[in-house]
Image (cartoon, rainbow, N blue to C red):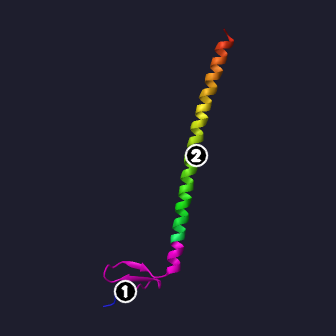
Amino acid sequence: MKKYLKVDSDVSLIRDTQSNAIINNNKSEFEKFTNLSKAKYKEKQEFNKVKEDLASVKNDLEEIKSLLKLITHTWIINTWR
């Protein structure tokens, strides 16, 4: 019995008769897939970094806002004394 059988729907696909797995026999397609996968992973990492940076900026702005309110409040109290 053959170890691999051709898949009717695609010439680059074969079926392993022992495991019944479908295998892509086209190396260039596999390389394109892995390159795309790596690019998407890198894009996701960059997006997550931007989200973290934005959260940090938002926290910094909240802190600055609180400090400005405190300074303003202190100035008003000291001015009216």
Label 1 crowd bin: few (<14), some (14–19), many (20+), radius 10 Å: some
Left or right: where does residue 23 sit relative to residue 43? Answer: left
Task: Check disc 2 and report the residue beneath it.
Answer: 53
Q: What element carries label 1?
A: strand
Task: Check disc 1 and report the residue beneath it.
Answer: 4
| Residue beneath the point at 56% across and 42% down | 55
Q: In which image quadrant can residue 43 be found? A: bottom right
| Residue beneath the point at 59% across and 33% down | 62
| Amino acid type shown at disc 2 | Asp
Q: What stretch is highlighted in magenta?
A: 4-33
Q: Is residue 15 magenta?
A: yes
Q: Is mark 2 on a helix, strand or loop?
A: helix
- Front residue of this view, candidates 9 and 80: 80
Percent x, y for residue 49? 56, 51
Give above or below for 67 relative to 37: above
| Amino acid type shown at disc 1 | Tyr
Left or right: where does residue 63 sit relative to residue 80? Answer: left
